[in-house]
Amino acid sequence: MGSDETKSTLDTENSTVPGCGTTTKSCWMSQVLLRIVLFAATLTSIVVMVTSKQTTNIFIPGTTKRIPTAKFTNSPALIYFVVALSVACIYSILSTLATVSAFKKPSSCSAILLLNLAIMDAVMVGIVASATGAGGGVAYLGLKGNKQVRWVKICHAYDKFCRHVAGALGVSLVASILLLLLSIISVISLYKRIR
């Protein structure tokens, strides 16, 4: 191995990367902070969705049933939303612990950890974004209805429930954006580490 190759390898290992290696404290702390905010966002979204329950008496035209209570368990898409965000919440805890561990012991941080974070961050982006989209579709039907298939809008009668669902979806969208940022940081960190 020549002198130039050794110097190039040392420069790559000493470069400032926002993921692992010999990085500055601010880079590590920003990634840890983003993961903590991700935890808060997913947990908030879960709590808001699970507490979205409203009871009222409403007659739905075209049916003989009355639906007195609106809650998230009435829709499979909203159940998927809660489950997907619960997975993302648990992942945020585990990835925060892994990032803090790598921050405290940079020598234990390897390209494998960066690769795992990059892959899992990308998977979580897909899971949270799909759950947000599924929940958004149900929320839109509740808000606007669909005249062609005679699905009536319900948000005029279940206004509190719809506000809770909208709030949970908004916070979930923030969580999706945070996961996208973390995914980008992980990929850039991996690239700089192996370059």
Image: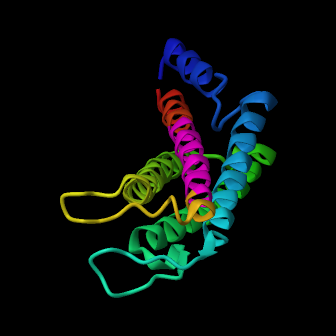
Q: How many marks?
A: 0
- Is 43 part of what is drawn in magenta? no
Q: Is residue 7 left or right of residue 149?
A: right
Q: Main secondary structure of the magenta part?
A: helix
Q: Name the spot of residue 71 as percent of width and height, x first.
A: 55, 75
At 73% across and 34% down in the image, what residue appears? 30
Q: Position of residue 184 (x, y in %)?
A: 50, 34
- Asked if 23 appears above or below 88 in the picture, the reply is above
Left or right of 170 in this view: 76: left
In the picture as drawn, the residue positioned furthest to the top comes out as 4
Task: Tell me, yes or no, whether the highlighted magenta stretch contains residue 174.
Answer: yes
Could you say where residue 45 lies in the image, as x and y percent from the top left?
63, 58
- Residue at horizontal 55 percent and vertical 24 percent from the top: 9
In this picture the colour scheme is rainbow
Left or right position of 71 against 47:
left
In magenta, the rendered stretch is 163-183
Q: In the figure, 182 relative to 60: above or below?
A: above
Q: Residue furthest left?
A: 148
Image spot of residue 166 (x, y percent): 56, 53
**Which residue is more in the foreground, 36 or 144?**
144
Q: Residue at x 53, y 45 (%)?
A: 173
Q: Nearer the viewer, residue 102 or 107?
A: 102
Residue 93 in view here:
no
Of 74 and 179, nearer the camera is 74
Depth order, front residue of 39/186:
39
Q: Is residue 121 visible?
A: yes
